[in-house]
Amino acid sequence: MKIYKAVIFMFLASVLISCEDEIKNANDYFSIEIEEGKNVFTTSESVSVLLTNKKNVEVRNTTFIFDTTEVIGGSIPLAQQRMGKHTIEAVVDVDGNEYSVSKDIVVVASKKPEIYGYNILETYPHDSKAYTQGLEFNNDTLYESTGQFKQSTIRKIEYTTGEVLQQMAIGDQYFGEGLTVLGDKIFQLTWKSGNGFIYNKDTFKKTGTFVYGKSKEGWGLCNDGENIYKSDGTERIWTLDKETLAEQKFIEVYTNKSKIDTINELEWVDNKIYANIYRKDAIAIVNPKSGAVEAVINLKGLKDQVSQTAELDVLNGIAYKGEPNILYVTGKNWDKLFKIEVLKK
């Protein structure tokens, strides 16, 4: 069992300040210093901070807050924290008036991600005109969202033959992005228009729309049967309310060293989020609670197996049928869909 040092919050205070003096800018009087002399920590570390009293003001009380939670007993287990930026705030009581200062730290994964390989099991035809943005199985039927202005569609595909069983254009003004199927509905994102669409899974009839609130753009979607997850082209993956599609919270995707931004197409696989990294021949396996990258599937060389046309673009598209260690992957304007086995080294 790991033992984590307590996160200790201390402050310095000394002599009185005159009652006539007024603190107009708390940062001129106080600052939070990190004792370890750094601002990036892993989940196996702890943080000790010191509130420096620059002008020796008499302080009645200091309350420390980590993100939005008041620190009780001065102990914060970083092992339970999500990846990314966190804010430490000190609320200082001086003569009955409260002042606050803050400092940010970044939490990264405690372990280096494992690197997995792959083995091609089967190769199927895929429409080379499809600029693949979203890919997801519902039973044995493959649903796909394609992009590009004036070319964006949603599709239902017989994956073994590549036959498009059903297709609908979403409108010339929209650039289609990720999609996910939940219940009898298809949810589809668009890129920069700030909204997405809801369709009947069987008829493709549009039954609703939704708008983006806090997330930057529309990139990828997946779901775990209860929650919908959305990427927006940054390091963030948002959890959406499945009824209103409003953003509820987010995780930030980090390895043990740094964030991974441009998170693209998503797939829910065995309680993890599998995420394409835009312009990389790789899929990140992300812990959906913390954002830690637990492994990376290196798909280098897969793009070389498709026809090398002028329109050929990057790897994008992950589908999962429930087969252990098996994924179906393709890319933008690829003429093949690959069934691959993930090789855990």
Image (cartoon, rainbow, N blue to C red):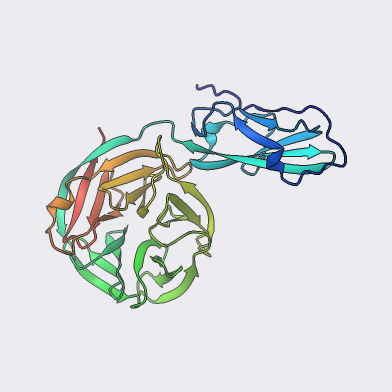
Q: Position of residue 9 (x, y in %)?
A: 66, 29
Quarter occupied by residue 78:
top right
Judge from the rendering whether residue 76 lies leftward or rightward of residue 277; answer left or right: right
Residue at 25% over, 48% down:
281
For the residue pair 187 and 175, the one nearer the viewer reads as: 175
Q: Position of residue 104 (x, y in %)?
A: 57, 40
Q: Residue lying farthest right?
A: 19
Task: Give the answer, above or below, for where 236 lies relative to 171.
Answer: above
Quarter occupied by residue 298:
top left
For the residue pair 170 and 253, the one nearer the viewer reads as: 253
Residue at 23% over, 56% down:
330
Q: Is residue 317 visible?
A: yes
Quarter occupied by residue 101:
top right
Residue at 22% over, 39% down:
117
Judge from the rendering whether residue 309 lies leftward or rightward of residue 133; answer left or right: left
Task: Give the answer, above or below, for where 141 lies relative to 91.
Answer: below
Judge from the rendering whether residue 67 lies leftward or rightward of residue 157; answer left or right: right
Q: Position of residue 54 (x, y in %)?
A: 71, 32
